[in-house]
Amino acid sequence: MTRLKINHSITSSSSSDGRLSLPESIMAVRVVRRSLDARKKKILKEGPKYTYVLDIDVTHQVAQNLRLKHQPGRNENVSLDNHEVDHGKSSPSLSSEKDNGVSLSSTVAGVVACDVDDDDHVIRLEKKNPTVIIVGAGPAGLFCALTLAQSQKCRPIVIERGQPVESRGKDIGTLMHRKIISKESNFAFGEGGAGTWSDGKLTTRIGRNSDNVRKVLKTFVDFGAPEKILVDGSPHLGTDNLVRLLRNMRTELRRLGGEVYFGAKMTKVNTDGEKVCGVDVEYSESLERGATQSAAKKVGTTETLYGDAVVLATGHSARDVYEELYKSGFQLEPKGFAVGFRVEHPQKVINKIQYGDTWGRNAFTGKKVTDDVNEAFFAPPDEGNVHQGLLPVSSYRLATDKAFDGNICRGAYSFCMCPGGQIVPASTQPDEVCVNGMSFSRRDSLWANAALVVTVNPDDPILEEYRKKYGVLAGIEFQREMERRAAVMGGGNFTVPVQRLTDFVNELPSTSAPPSSYRLGVKPTACHEIYPKPLTNALKDAVLNQFEKQMPGFLCEDALLHGVETRTSSPLRVSRDPETLQAIGKIGLYPSGEGAGFAGGIVSAAVDGLIVGDAVLNDLFGCDSDVNSKTPSSKRENVGFSY
């Protein structure tokens, strides 16, 4: 298998049915990635183009003629019997079998400490198998649990403070329609984590073609995600697909002998000297459709769960967890984060900026109201400029490291861009206002939104007063205060303060606002007064001198800032050893994922869960799993990112 630049002449021949045929020297062609390039939008003959990365199977003789040499990730040998890639050494297959749409991973050879119930195909683990407690059912926690369950060497117990996706949706509906928030089941807490009610973006900065990233994407497909995520340049699932996928993952975890409990809030990590031995759990009502009695605990009770290891995979909004760890003497360290606003434009405006007048009218969602509004926004095409090609609604990504705050330059960038989406409340307390963006899989709303944020460094001068008072928790308290300021400015009851982007850069309070997708109410006001002056200055400079140049038309009267976007990532991390991935100073505690400060998004959090799962198996049994990572434990690295 090799990646080659294909000469058009080799694909020019056609079969009798009109399809392109391959020359005998090429055995097969597979699409690895498809991306849309709209940089030549003003040239009709060029216009937006799909670019492809292909895997091409050639015979060994052709490879020799082309003098191709083994290059991992580029030129690799493939077994003709099973199409497995030979990475230059013997390695287990990453593939899994499917049965009725649920991934059935093979049991690790030589493990006999389990039985399979022939009636319901549920694997019964023996009690002597080590127990691993996983706190949090977000991407890191779920993929760690799958790694452990598939090994059949230990029994994972997943505890999640929020509700399963089906009940979580009802709690979110109550918030959206009645403005009543459940502190434990909302846009931030619940099965799947904060990313469930977001766009489900699967883009990542850690290497799209790495083994573990491909494993994560293939696992999503096994559990119900559309196969196009394996090839799309900017894949996304959408909230509607995530709901079905998460239910399938939960079912498979239990089939493999794992346990999953909802309404189960960890209140303390228990230690015996330096060894972590379990957690205290407080149970609230669990509303899981079709759950057996064994899948729920008595409401209002507390329990100490004992385990051979604990994986801490809570999300970045679990501030009470950080505070408990800090009080209990666990080693925490500050890390960079970013704060700002969520900006919203009409999707038709972004289509015009990105695709141009000629092609923007052809952005298509399949929803008549949205498509009619978009088409009416553009002038009728001139004769000769008519074409039939349909395009997805456009997105964007903006970034600069030259956002001047009046003293120094900061980083500023767009984050979590949601085309055809809506802005939603990400608050977890009634006296705080924090927003996020989400899209369904069709991305067919009238709006496009994205976070516009500025970086805050661990030693940032704007955090000085918070460091003096709160120490390592300074970043959390800063976020909390900004959210409370936004709540006061909005007038309470989850009403969001908004400001036209044109008013923001001129530091003028807005007295009116264009329509917004945020359904709980908006109040035009002076959002430029929320953050410390250096952050406001930096964001203004980025918009005026960088982003408007990158996307002419971005700064317009219809662009509306919503306050505030503060939870782009955790402002601190639980210190962990880069070799063992255990918390520094504690044995048997494995911080993982975005909340622990080691990931930034669905895919990187899931990959971190895979790697931590392997680390747990290595420490308990002296080996990694046969299913996931090929990375030796001595060469493990954090998969997340720092600002």
Image (cartoon, grey):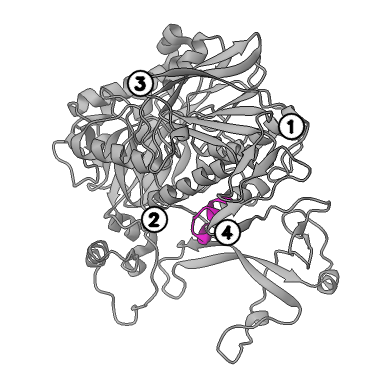
Between disc 2 and disc 1, the foreground one is 1
From the image, tell me which residue sits under label 2: 441
Q: Is residue 525 left or right of residue 183?
A: left
Label 4 – label 1 distance at C-alpha: 30 Å
Q: Secondary structure at mark 2?
A: loop
x, y (%) of residue 112?
74, 40
Q: Quadrant of the N terminus?
A: bottom right
Where is residue 186 shown, x and y percent of the image?
Answer: 34, 34
Which of marks 1 and 3 precedes in the sequence?
3
Residue 480 tag number: 3
Q: Amino acid at mark 1?
A: Asn
Q: Position of residue 118 (x, y in %)?
A: 61, 50
Looking at the image, residue 477 sits to the left or right of residue 514; the answer is right
* Marks 4 and 3, how far apart at CA: 47 Å
Counting residues from the N terminus, which is met first, the one under dot 2 or under dot 3? 2
Q: Marks 2 and 4, Cα distance to the nearest angstrom? A: 25 Å
Residue 117 in the image: above or below residue 61? above
Q: Amino acid at mark 3?
A: Arg
Mark whose residue sits in front, 3 or 1: 1
Mark 2–mark 1 Cα distance, whole angstroms, equals: 38 Å
Q: Which residues are magenta?
A: 219-229
The dot on residue 99 is 4
The type of residue carrying mark 2 is Ser
In the rendered structure, find residue 618 and report the number of the disc placed on it. Answer: 1
Please, what is the three-letter code of the amino acid marked with disc 4?
Asp
Residue at 26% x, 67% y is: 375
Evaluate whether residue 635 shows in this view: yes
Residue neighbourhood size for the residue with mark 1, other residues' Cα within 10 Å, grouped as few (<14), some (14–19), many (≥20): some
Q: Residue at x 86, y 70 (%)?
A: 64
For marks 4 and 3 on the same chain, the one whose residue lies earlier in the sequence: 4
- Residues tagged 3 and 1 counted as in contact (Cβ below 8 A): no
